[in-house]
Image (cartoon, grey):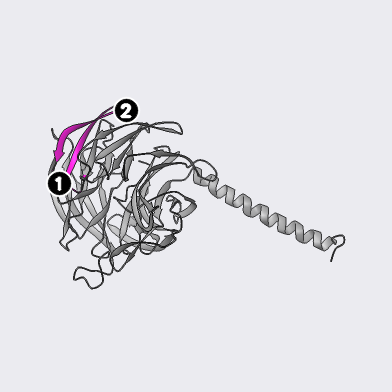
């Protein structure tokens, strides 16, 4: 019924308004804190799921997203999730952050086929996200080559390189403040070579490109925004895929995913100080090392090993869990020192700046696991950060 509100009614409205205002301020303060937090960004593919070992397109899928995580918080927490095109195709390094955590760049290797939504086709989009906006928002979408996969930003924050799986090229982008602009492409190999990931050396003068379809790691020379293929191709192992370079620029680690036939696969060490750079060591790590990351202090490498968790259950190579494997780095030597079970079809891995927190992406479970590392002791904290799609690529600022 109508009429003037009573005093009690006014008090109730006041309390409700205060609670609403308080909740709004809390949300705003959380995002504001996120602008100054230690950030990890996860790219999540909403289109693809794994059904008994087969990557399958979802009917009427939800949008792809990115989840922005405060990895420096205790415990780490998601502070935003926005719609951004993403893809599980390619190494789980489809995200890169500028050193000041101002921008995130996200590639989309595959999209739904407009002619047949039960299939996917090559995409060519690079999305630019302003992480300091409140809330974070997409500010640009740029065109790459066919099927952009792994990408990296140099330590100066002025140049980004994107490996295009569908055409054997690397796209070049300049960065100035919040403006990312295309600056050409360099051809590395033929269209079927599977250019998968590209990573800069710390001085920004060289980059390595993995080619999983023809088994090479190519060396690029960089001078400002000029990027050239040196014609130096390194033989690492079967299907070099993921790649990371140590903070001191002494070595690179390459995850060789192999042929998926149930055999144990490998990680190779490239000596970047040698002239020319070359593989100097290779160790066995298990079935399909997907994600690989070196800790900020350069002493530890984390490897996400699928371990047959992506196989059909009837396969003799199926295991009901993947594995997070930690390797101690001493010069060019790698020594396993800790391991832990993870989920299924697991993808990327990221360290906090102090190296004590490790995030691991599980595609099937649509979650990010949180581990703690204390010396040589690796522990599953039990915390899970849920994502709206399958988490397929993750990075922090480097």
In the depicted view, which residue is nearer to us: 374 or 353? 353
Is residue 127 toward the left or the right of residue 267 in the image? Answer: right
Figure check: 338 above or below 178: below
Please rate how many residues cluster around mark 2, counting C-alpha atoms within 10 Å: few if below 14, some from 14 to 19, many from 20: some
Secondary structure, mark 2, is: loop
Please rate how many residues cluster around mark 1, counting C-alpha atoms within 10 Å: few if below 14, some from 14 to 19, many from 20: many
Is residue 377 toward the left or the right of residue 270 in the image? Answer: right
Q: Residue at x 26, y 54 (%)?
A: 290
Answer whether residue 234 is magenta in the image. Answer: yes
How much space separates mark 1 and mark 2, taking CA atoms?
28 Å
Residue furthest out toward the front: 115
In the depicted view, which residue is nearer to us: 263 or 250? 263
Q: In the picture, residue 342 is in which quadrant?
A: bottom left
**Residue 361 screen position, x and y as percent:** 35, 57
In the depicted view, which residue is nearer to us: 342 or 375? 342
Q: Residue at x 38, y 64 (%)?
A: 365
Residue furthest out toward the right: 3
**Residue 263 screen position, x and y as percent:** 15, 61
Question: In the rendering, which numbered label is found on residue 225?
Answer: 2
The stretch in magenta equals: 211-235
**Residue 6 screen position, x and y as percent:** 85, 62
Q: Can residue 247 be seen in this view?
A: no
Is residue 212 toward the left or the right of residue 22 in the image? Answer: left
Q: Is the magenta stretch mostly helix, strand or loop?
A: strand
The disc, 1 or 2, on the residue closer to the chain's N-terminal end is 2
């Amino acid at each position: 019924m109508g009429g003037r509100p009573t005093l009690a009614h006014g008090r109730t409205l006041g309390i409700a308004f205060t609670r609403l205002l308080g909740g709004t301020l809390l949300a705003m303060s959380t995002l504001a804190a996120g602008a100054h937090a230690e950030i990890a960004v996860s790219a999540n593919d909403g289109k693809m799921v794994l059904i008994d070992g087969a990557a399958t397109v979802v009917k009427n899928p939800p949008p792809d997203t990115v989840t922005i995580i405060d990895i420096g918080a205790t415990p780490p927490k998601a502070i935003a999730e926005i719609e951004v095109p993403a893809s599980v195709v390619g190494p789980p390094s489809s995200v890169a952050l500028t050193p000041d955590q101002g921008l995130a760049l996200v590639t989309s290797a595959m999209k739904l086929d407009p002619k047949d939504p039960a299939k996917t086709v090559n995409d060519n989009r690079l999305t630019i996200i302003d992480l300091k906006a409140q809330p974070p928002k997409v500010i640009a979408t740029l065109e790459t080559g066919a099927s952009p996969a792994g990408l990296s930003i140099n330590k100066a924050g002025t140049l980004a390189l994107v490996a295009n799986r569908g055409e054997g090229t690397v796209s070049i982008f300049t960065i100035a403040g919040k403006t990312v602009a295309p600056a050409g492409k360099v051809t590395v190999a033929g269209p079927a070579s599977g250019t998968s990931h590209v990573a800069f050396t710390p001085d920004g003068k060289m980059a390595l490109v993995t080619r999983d379809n023809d088994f090479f790691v190519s060396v690029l020379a960089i001078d400002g925004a000029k990027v050239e293929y040196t014609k130096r191709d390194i033989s690492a192992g079967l299907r070099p895929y993921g790649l990371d370079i140590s903070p001191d620029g002494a070595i690179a680690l390459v995850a060789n995913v192999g042929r998926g036939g149930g055999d144990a696969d490998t990680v190779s060490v490239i000596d970047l100080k040698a002239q020319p750079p070359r593989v100097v060591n290779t160790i066995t790590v298990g079935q399909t090392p997907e994600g690989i990351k070196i800790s900020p202090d350069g002493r530890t490498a984390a490897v996400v090993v699928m371990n047959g968790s992506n196989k059909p259950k009837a396969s003799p190579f199926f295991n009901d869990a993947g594995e997070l494997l930690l390797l101690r780095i001493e010069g060019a030597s790698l020594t396993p020192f800790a391991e832990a079970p993870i989920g299924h079809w697991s993808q990327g891995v990221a360290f906090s700046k102090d190296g004590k927190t490790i995030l691991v992406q599980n595609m099937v479970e649509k979650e990010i696991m949180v581990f703690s590392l204390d010396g040589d002791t690796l522990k599953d904290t039990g915390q899970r950060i849920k994502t709206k799609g399958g988490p397929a690529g993750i990075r922090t600022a480097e």
